[in-house]
Amino acid sequence: MCLKGSASDGKAKCELMTKKEETFTLPGCSNWVLANAGATGYYRTGYQPDAVRALATDAETKLTPGERIALQNDIWASIRVGREPVGDYLAFAQGLQSDRNRAVLEDVLGRLNYIGRYLVTDSDRDSFHVWLRQYLAPAAKEVGYEPKPGESDEQRTLRSRVLGAMGYDARDPQTLEMAHKVAEQALADPTSVDSELAGGALGLAALNGDSAYYDQVMAALKNPKSPEEYYRYLFTLPQFTDQRLLQRTLDFAISPDVRSQDALGVITSVMGNPAGQQLAWDFVRQHWTEVEKAGGPFASAQVVGATSVFCDAASRDQVTEFFTAHKVAAAERTYKQSIERINNCIDLKSQQETQLTSWLGQHGPAGGK
């Protein structure tokens, strides 16, 4: 085990652990100890809440990007098994608010997306959105809405991720308004907008998109200038929230207008959209013959895997019942993994939902902190 503390000046002390329980001593007096210095060890570490807060304070200056990612993984793993409250992760995430390393920030945004989707109650959603807007505001202001001359691909990707989270996860009105303008510009002249920015803007505009915007995307889909454009438009269709428009997308997916290799991707993308999750699952069950025909025995495993987005017992039981009656031979392992993920999500939600409500009450807009 390689250890370093706040008083270690970045130097790690590596020790061979030969017993089930063993004590090691580090020089100096540290208020935290990182138990996987260099992030090279294949083991998990549990931390007490005060240690997490202390690590969060020093993470950006005293931990490498790899260590920051590994520490996030350890904290999240402890939360997943009920050993730490979800507030510990959010406290650590707050310590990374000014971190602009793309890999580190992507890790944070992925978990905040999960928390927002599965652990936030409907009554807490507005509070979570406000907290998340405040959290992301400095990064969004820094990356801006427009590409800068000579910037790196990392910076372009960072902008796309930050603005995507600001619009989708935080539902920031200003970001959504800007996304709509960029989407309109991209539809009018695809070459006038950075491709990565355009892809994100098209999807964000779909969140509140009406039938007129849907028709614009569909028209562009029928006359793309490149395969990249085609898929950008195709996978904008599953991101709408209007049920009627999502139903159009599902019907379109199994029509002759969509190639069979793309059909299941469209259907599973609708299932991955919280607004279309149940709609797509009902569609799959009602049109299973067409879905199987489009995907074939191996590709149909994609649909089986997509059911892992569920996080409630009733949906899990529906998945079990349906795929017991409609076995996909090539997806037996995928089916077991999906059920396992659903059960894990159900357990996590039952353990952490109330704790998250409490944390938001203390740190969200109502808490005034």
Image: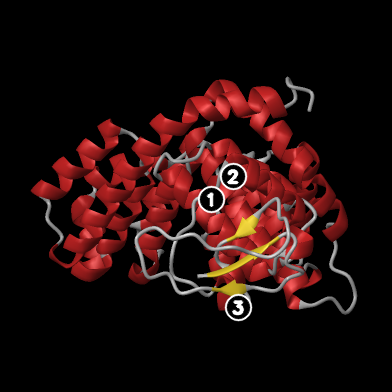
Relative to 37, residue 357 above or below: above
Name the element at disc 3. loop
Q: Are marks 2 and 1 in contact (CB under 8 Å)?
A: yes
Is residue 120 visible to us here?
yes
Closer to the camera in the image, 284 or 149: 149
Q: Which residue is drawn at 78% across and 59% down?
A: 185
Position of residue 254 measured from the top left corner of the image (x, y, whole percent) = 33, 57
In whole angstroms, how far apart are the C-alphas of marks 2 and 3? 42 Å
Q: Name the residue under label 1.
A: 75
Dot 2 or dot 1: first in sequence order is 1
Position of residue 218 measured from the top left corner of the image (x, y, whole percent) = 56, 56
Closer to the camera in the image, 163 or 196: 163
Q: Name the residue under label 2.
A: 89
Mark 3 Cα-neighbour bin, 10 Å: few <14, some 14–19, many ≥20: few
Q: Name the residue under label 3.
A: 226
In whole angstroms, how far apart are the C-alphas of marks 2 and 1? 6 Å
Q: Residue at x 22, y 55 (%)?
A: 335
Name the element at disc 2. helix
